[in-house]
Amino acid sequence: MFEPSEQVYDAIEFAARAHRGQVRKATGVPYIVHPLGAARLLIEHGCTHEDAVVAAILHDTVEDTDATLEELRVAFGSTVADFVEALSEPDKRASWEVRKHHTISTLKEAPDPVLLVSCADKLDNLRSIAADVEQRGEAAWRSFKRGAPEQAWYYRALSAVFSTRLPRHPLVQRFVKLVDQVFATVTPAAVSPR
């Protein structure tokens, strides 16, 4: 069983401050709910790797706030900072296609803890998408930079990486199942980096 340390609570406080005022697309739910949801999924699926749980809590701080990798390195150590760096898109100005291809490529070589944090992150996102699609129908896809066919391509590509790398992990199996459910009737787009 996972026993949260002071570092976990410090990470929650750090992330809550960093994401203060941010909300999830289309819902108005405070953004901090998402990284905590990713950490919760890790813990519920047997993760006892504290640096992975801390990285899940902090995974969007460098990408989406003013926090820096150096701040994370000082406050939470090099392993957590390295995990967060691996989980962050290096250039937010790049096209959606380039950024998503980068994510998929990075995950193919990432250490298992990074892969699991990413899976928990994407599963939490997909659960939100599924709930939004159930509530608003096709209008839910208008909240994204790319529509359902592009999202189907991305989530199916992630599913392929996760299930190739960690096919028996229950978190991965849960992700794959939800991808299949959410995108059952969506034909994935052909997405090339541009």
Image (cartoon, helix red, strand yellow):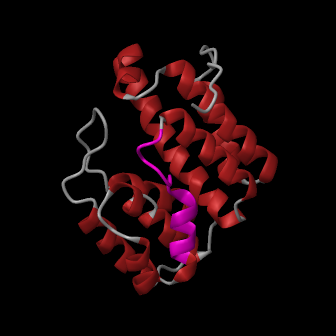
Q: Which residues are magenta?
A: 80-94
For the N terminus, give its image quadrant. bottom right
* Any part of residue 13 in sight: yes
Does the segment drawn in magenta span residue 61?
Answer: no
Residue 68 on image: x %, y %: 38, 70
Q: Going by the image, does 174 lie left or right of 40?
A: right
Q: Nearer the viewer, residue 187 or 190?
A: 190
Q: Nearer the viewer, residue 32 or 106?
A: 106
For the C terminus, give its image quadrant. top right
Q: Is residue 89 above or below residue 16?
A: above
* Any part of residue 168 in sight: no
Does the segment drawn in magenta span residue 92?
Answer: yes
Q: Is residue 41 above or below residue 11?
A: above
Residue 101 on image: x %, y %: 62, 40
Residue 113 on image: x %, y %: 65, 66
Q: Nearer the viewer, residue 66 or 91?
A: 91
Q: Is residue 26 above or below residue 137?
A: below
| Residue at position x 39%, y 29% in the image | 144
| Residue at position x 37%, y 78% in the image | 71
Residue 35 on image: x %, y %: 41, 57
- For the image, the number of numbered tags is 0
Q: Is residue 76 above or below residue 135?
A: below
| Residue at position x 74%, y 57% in the image | 109
| Residue at position x 56%, y 38% in the image | 98
